[in-house]
Image: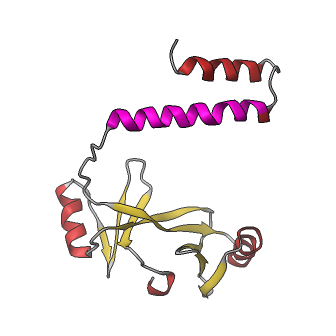
C-alpha cells in the first residue's frame, strides 16, 4: 500500500458524496502533514546553497485601479494600517511586512519582495548577472524576473515601508 492510497480513497469518497468537505479535510490534513514530513526527512539536511538566502517575504506590491477603494478593503478586512500614502501609492503595514498599492490602469501584481541575508545592491547585481539575469537597479532597489516574467525584488531584512 502506498502513502497516496489513503489520500486517493478520501478524495474518491468525497467526490462520491460519502464524506462532507469537513470530514474529507479532517482526514487529509494529517495525511498531508505526514507526507510533508516524509519529503522533508528524505531531503535530510541538504540545503542547496542558493544565490541568496531568503529570510522571508518583505512586501508585495499590487497595481490597483482605485487606491482608496483597495486601501479601505485591506484596512477593513485584514486589519492593515496606512503607513504613508500619496495620490499614486499607499503603503499598508502588515506586522513586520507591508503591502504596497500602486495606481494602475489594470489590476495585477507589480512585484513581490524577499528579505535576503546580507543584502547589498551591488553584490546582488553581480550575483544575478553571474546567474544570467539582467537585474534592474534603481538606487538601493534591485529587480529581476522569475521564469514567468513576474518581477522579483530583493531587500535587506527589516526593510520597511518608510524606507521604500
- In percent of width and height, residue 138 lies at 33, 78
Side of 3 relative to 54 (left or right): right
Q: Residue at x 79, y 17 (%)?
A: 16
- In percent of width and height, residue 136 lies at 31, 69
Asked if residue 24 is among those painted magenta in the image, a careful observer would answer yes
Q: What's the magenta region?
A: 23-43
Instruction: Identify which residue, 156 or 9, lies in the foreground.
Output: 9
Q: Residue at x 74, y 19 (%)?
A: 13
Query: Is the C terminus in the top left, top right, bottom left or bottom right quadrant?
Result: bottom left
Asked if residue 82 is among those painted magenta in the image, a careful observer would answer no
Q: Residue at x 40, y 61 (%)?
A: 152
Q: Which quadrant would residue 150 be assigned to in this image?
A: bottom left
Instruction: Describe the colour scheme in one phrase.
Output: secondary structure
Q: Which quadrant would residue 55 be assigned to in this image?
A: bottom left
Q: Residue at x 81, y 19 (%)?
A: 18
- In percent of width and height, residue 135 lies at 28, 65
Amino acid at each position: 500500500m502506498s502513502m497516496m492510497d489513503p489520500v486517493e480513497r478520501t478524495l474518491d469518497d468525497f467526490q462520491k458524496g460519502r464524506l462532507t468537505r469537513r470530514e474529507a479535510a479532517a482526514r487529509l490534513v494529517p495525511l498531508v502533514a505526514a507526507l510533508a514530513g516524509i519529503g522533508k526527512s528524505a531531503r535530510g539536511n541538504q540545503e542547496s546553497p542558493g544565490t541568496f538566502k531568503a529570510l522571508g517575504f518583505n512586501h508585495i506590491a499590487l497595481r490597483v485601479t482605485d487606491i482608496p477603494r483597495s486601501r479601505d478593503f485591506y484596512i477593513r478586512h485584514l486589519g492593515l494600517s496606512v503607513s504613508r500614502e500619496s495620490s499614486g501609492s499607499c503603503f499598508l503595514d502588515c506586522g513586520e511586512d507591508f503591502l504596497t498599492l500602486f495606481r494602475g490602469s489594470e489590476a495585477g501584481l507589480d512585484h513581490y519582495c524577499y528579505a535576503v541575508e546580507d543584502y547589498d545592491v551591488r553584490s546582488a547585481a553581480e550575483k544575478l548577472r553571474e546567474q544570467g539575469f539582467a537585474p534592474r537597479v534603481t538606487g538601493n532597489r534591485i529587480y529581476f524576473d522569475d521564469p514567468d516574467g513576474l518581477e522579483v525584488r530583493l531587500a535587506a531584512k527589516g526593510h520597511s515601508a518608510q524606507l521604500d
